[in-house]
Image (spheres, grey):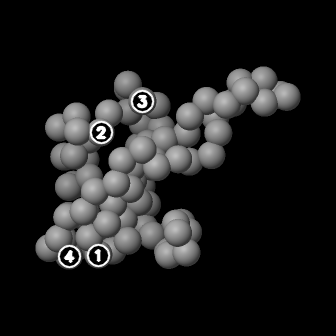
């Protein structure tokens, strides 16, 4: 579980060949967020920054974690967000 906007959300982290690490968060209802860790230049050099939303979407009627994960992967595959 991760905190997002004051709410607990389920999440999955995946590796994308184009974007690197992507985190999918789902509020166990209808709201999804896709997040990435953009590169940041720090005093220690180039590193990944904090998780940042880059796409949010809504899908009603999802009842299980398995359905939520599958739907989010479909959105990524369709290339809507990356």
Pick the front one: 62 or 40: 40
Q: Which mark is drawn over residue 81?
A: 2
- CB-based contact (under 8 Å), mark 3 and mark 2: no
Q: Is 20 left or right of 31, judged from the image as shown? A: right
Q: Tag 2 or tag 1, which sits nearer the N-term?
A: 1
- CB-based contact (under 8 Å), mark 1 and mark 2: no
Image point (78%, 30%), residue name: 42
| Residue 71 image point, x, y percent | 20, 55
Q: Which mark is drawn over residue 63?
A: 4
Quadrant assignment, res 39: top right
- Say above or below: 77 vs 59: above
- Say above or below: 37 vs 43: below
Q: Is 40 left or right of 6, judged from the image as shown? A: right
| Residue 17 image point, x, y percent | 38, 26
Q: Tag 4 or tag 2, which sits nearer the N-term?
A: 4
The residues bearing labels 3 and 2 have C-alpha atoms spaced at a distance of 11 Å
| Residue 49 image point, x, y percent | 64, 39
Q: Is 43 left or right of 31, judged from the image as shown? A: right
Image point (67%, 31%), residue name: 40
Q: Tag 1 or tag 4, which sits nearer the N-term?
A: 1
Image point (14%, 73%), residue name: 61
Q: Tag 4 or tag 3, which sits nearer the N-term?
A: 3
- CB-based contact (under 8 Å), mark 1 and mark 3: no
Q: Which mark is drawn over residue 29?
A: 1
Q: Tag 3 or tag 1, which sits nearer the N-term?
A: 3
For mark 3, what is the residue? 19
């Amino acid at each position: 579980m991760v905190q997002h906007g004051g709410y607990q959300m389920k999440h999955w982290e995946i590796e994308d060949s184009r974007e690197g690490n992507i985190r999918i968060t789902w509020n166990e209802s209808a709201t999804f967020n896709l997040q990435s860790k953009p590169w940041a230049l720090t005093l220690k050099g180039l590193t990944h920054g904090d998780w940042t939303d880059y796409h949010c979407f809504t899908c009603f009627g999802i009842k299980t974690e398995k359905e939520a994960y599958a739907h989010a992967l479909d959105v990524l595959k369709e290339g809507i967000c990356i």
